[in-house]
Amino acid sequence: MRFIFPPIRRSRNPLVRALSLVLGLAVVGVLLVFGVVVLGVLMAGGLVFLAVRQWKLAHGRVAGAARPAAQKDPNVLEGEFVVIRQNTPIHH
């Protein structure tokens, strides 16, 4: 399916042509300024997010380091494990 647009009738009046050119440039300028503002807001928000995240991580490390290490039993091995039974069939 093809779209056939009607032919564009360009005005012969030089004043109308100049005004349409200025209007087009103004629209492009507004779009560029809007894009720069949005980019600035996104970058500022990202920097704030990263700063808050780093601040929370730094406070978490300090709080974790403040705990005495003597509370842990040195004979206990911590970890995750899975029990595998050899006599039972595996169902997927």
Image (tube, grey):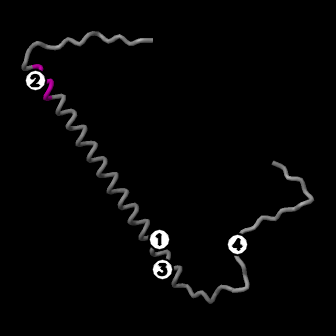
User: What's the amino acid at mark 4?
Assistant: Gly
Q: Earlier in the sequence, mark 2 or mark 3?
A: 2
Q: Which mark is residue 65?
A: none
Badge 3 element: helix
Magenta segment, which residues?
16-22
Mark 2 → mark 3, Cα distance in angstroms: 66 Å
Query: In the figure, is residue 63 to the left or right of 51?
Result: right
Mark 1 → mark 3, Cα distance in angstroms: 9 Å
Q: Earlier in the sequence, mark 3 or mark 4?
A: 3
Q: Which mark is residue 57?
A: 1
Mark 1 → mark 2, Cα distance in angstroms: 58 Å
Residue 54, quarter of the rendered image: bottom left
Q: Identify the residue position indicated by label 2 in the image.
A: 18
Q: Which residue is found at the position 62% from the left and 89% from the top?
A: 70
Q: Which mark is residue 79?
A: 4
Q: Which mark is residue 62?
A: 3
